[in-house]
Amino acid sequence: MSNGPGPGPLRFGAEADSLVEAAQKFKAILNTKDAEEFEKSTKELVDKELNSLQVQQQATKNLMNMKRLQRFLDGMADLQTVLKTLDFQAVDSVMACIWGPMRFFFKATSLHERAFDSLLDVYHRLGLSILPFDDYTPVFRESQDDIKCLVHTYEDVLKFHSAAYRLFSLRSQLWTKLHRATWKDLEPTFDHLCSTLKLHAKYIDDHGSFLRRMDSGFDDPGRTDTNRSRKTEFQFYEAGYQDLQRGFKRDERDRKITQKDKIKDWIATELDLKKLHERFREDRSVCPENGKWLWRQHDEVSNWMREDIPEESTIWVHGTRGLGKTILSSHVVDRLGELAKEGRDVPSEAQVCYFYCHEGSESDNYLGILRGILKQLVSLAEVPDDNVFPEQNIRNNNLAILPLCEDKITTSGGSTLTNPDVAQSLIEVFFENNLRQYVIIDGLDECKANTEITQAINFFTKAVNVCDELNQGQLRVMFMSQSSKEVRRCMERSMDKNGLSLKSVEVELNAKENMEDIRRYVRRMLAQRNEEVNPFNLTEREFQEIEDKISTTSEGLFLYAHLAMEYLLEQQTKKDLLDRVKPGVLPTGLKDMYAKLLGALEIRLRKKGTWDRARQLFGWLICAHRPLKLHEIQAILCFNPEEEVVDFDLYKLRVGVTDLLGSLVQVLPGDNIRLIHSTAKEYLADTEHIDAKTVQCELATLCLRYLSLRCFVADDYTESERRNHILHGYFSFQDYAMSQWYKHVISVVENCHPVFDSNNAQVPNTTTSFHKALEKFISSHNNDLKPLPEPDTPSDLPREHIDTFQDLSFYPLLLRLWNHICIHQNGSAEDRNKVGIARLEEALKSHRAHIEKDFKPDRKTQNDDTIEDYYGPNLFKCSRTLCKFFHHGFSNKKDRESHQNRHDRPYPCLIKDCGFAPFGFSSNKDRQRHVRNYHPEETEGPSQFQQMSRRVESAKFKCSICEKSFTRNINLKGHERSHFGERPYACSHCGKAFARLNDCRRHERIHTRNRQ
């Protein structure tokens, strides 16, 4: 669309430049086709097409009251007439930005009644605020200032056209999804434009009245004070207009920031993926060049990252456990970001999202993955600092999708995102809206169920197929995981379901590819410790010998190399170091290395007298039935069962957990404590230092003793005692103990009988402690426990495990508790979401109510400790024990109540032990779909993995020589060249020729990679 001739010389000065500039800014957001079409647009064409639309509506008896357009059309026609009268020479080009968009909008919305009606409504509102400018031609001839009002009017109309064009220029299937929410979100903009148009109209009308008074002889046009008054009035008008503009921009920016924060709070992800990624980046900083072999040696990965049209938009990269795949994933994320920033091979507008699955995390499931990806997409929406009408196209701006997200908050109900279907629908819109989107999902194998893995693969693979039909390579997904049988089976089924071959998308990593990286890492770690260069004074030969030893022993597992360096760098002398790497001394395999590290930690901590505490903590981390938060670990340490007190002041750890447990643990964002790797739990539990079965008994004993404290059982418990106990942290452990106590008892019954074997050296203490805990608990809650069935009465009580304890003194007590637990677990979903003991249920409710009512997280407790130190940042908890928000909680009561209401759904999952549906379902149809996805064995229909029918694109392009068929003509052309030996695409570096352009590009990457 051309910019037209320059401004006219007569009545226009700077105002002409402003008109042309406004038109040029609008044209900058148009695509080429629309720009050309708009250039040819006139009022006559608008009238013609509107008449045609009205005839169609009349024929279908669907008239839309198009008279609403009249005021706007008349006002714009008058504007055009005035501009011509004032000899503005670019009038046709400038007015094309009015008539062209109107034709475009009416054509786009003609088949969508709601959109067409809402468009007419806005034009009607704008038209009511526009004067019949032709009646004020003398005003514009008289005053340059009034022409400025015309310019502002034109600019304001183009602001509406810009906002509408960004929506309606999207594909029809996309803008129809966005329209309702976007139009509602634009209401403040429409209101603002109506206000400013009224301001312009008022000034012009007031000035017109002033001129009429002069023409009648009431005012002398030559009077100086009159001219000064007119100038002052214009300054007031201009200042008022600018104030309105600034105020609207400020309010709109604040509104968008609030909207964005509201959506992120609603998504409610547990993991802070950004901080997690930063930690992985920090881990890579020792050897930033490591990991580049992934795309240098695997063309499939390089092709997926860089090619405009990749061979496959979905790839599965897999390797053995401990290879360092998570670090490689983080490297891919950053490399894509670098390429996008450089604008080299990857478009500058490309977006990169990622997710790291963590075993034991509450985000290791399909909904957790969706939440993580969605939150990043929302976070990538940039709120403009100083321009609410940014010139970039909506397709490069995630901000355009936020209104739809906010709308989903209202329509889906609840204060948090709990419906995967809602998350899917939003993510799909983001994907369709972005020109290039990368998604990297690491650690699929750490999801807690195969159904979670399958759903994740199915959704993202299907999304890739949808986007490939629009623009191949628009969405690219990388799955990174172990190549376990379970993951492979899920991947095969999902690929087949989506019409892909697993062989074409998988990339198998060889541990040997890590060898050079491991050698480099070992040298860097040895060469610099605590900013001291070559602290062990090693010779080059010694460096190489240690590198050789560790790289060979590691067998390419980077995890082993990392643990080995943690172990070796603990040595205090060069001799100690060299002795540890001698043949037969350095541990072989991860299991031996974990044992060695734990042994070294024991030696160090025994000198400090803290080993027993550290061993306790390791045991709790390994055996806890859900991941423990830091304040919960502190609570266990501060509980003295014998004295029946909780004392944070005396027993709270005043050092970091990593200071005590070393490199084997890590503190994740949100004070979540995790072992260093998923393998650690398995191997540490198998060492001589940790007896997992004994720890299970200890945790069961702790829970039972804790729940027998006076604050949970006493009838004469006072409010002053409760307040004092809150301030002393007595209830820090209640969330865990209330929801997990019975699980630890079940673990004892089903797995821990050997702990009480008379040959076990620890049996006297363990047996006595557990016996006392059972006595205390049952005597405290006897009235709430279910009675045992009569000896001769038939019973469904499982006896297989419990009867193995018959020879132990506490058997009658354990049998009583076992009976109560089994009855409770066989109850309804509503019952299983309760603590199971009425007295405890009431105590929990009372304690929480007082904490919510009287305390804030930053409230001081003892000295400098705060309520948050004892109870975490979220004090408003869900009442259902199977819900993660039972312990995770909310920061305010409103969100908790909104969440709680979602639990009141009439269709719970029929599988009583299902942990994937804590909310139940609002319809039987939703429940049936859940059962098909998560419990296919319970359905009467065919397997969920049965081959489903799908649309297969016909291979309509047939080779005239061998009759082989292709789905794309470009592939046929490349194939036919191979028959004749034609190789028209030559490498720009070495001259080697290829039949296909993509083959040539892929080859050229080799030269590029070798230079990097």
Image (tube, rainbow, N blue to C red):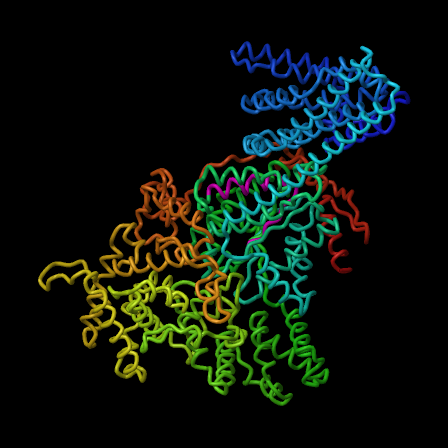
**813 lies above or below 300:** below
Is most of the magenta stretch helix, strand or loop?
A: helix
**520 lies above or below 420:** below
* Residue 339 seen in the figure: yes
In reply to whether residue 66 is colored magenta, the answer given is no
In reply to whether residue 437 is colored magenta, the answer given is yes
The image quarter in which residue 390 lies: top right
The image quarter in which residue 877 lies: bottom left
Taking depth in this image into account, of 956 and 869 the one nearest to the observer is 869
Residue in view at x 60 percent, y 14 percent: 66
Q: Is residue 639 left or right of residue 483?
A: left
Q: Position of residue 2 (x, y in %)?
A: 81, 26
Q: Is residue 877 left or right of residue 959?
A: left
Residue in view at x 10 percent, y 60 percent: 793
Q: Is residue 539 left or right of residue 629?
A: right
Placement of the N terminus among the 4 image quadrants: top right
Q: Position of residue 693 (x, y in %)?
A: 34, 73
Q: Position of residue 918 (x, y in %)?
A: 37, 50
Q: Residue furthest right?
A: 9
* Residue 954 seen in the figure: no
Residue in view at x 74 percent, y 58 percent: 1009
Taking depth in this image into account, of 481 and 777 the one nearest to the observer is 777
Extent of the magenta region: 421-441
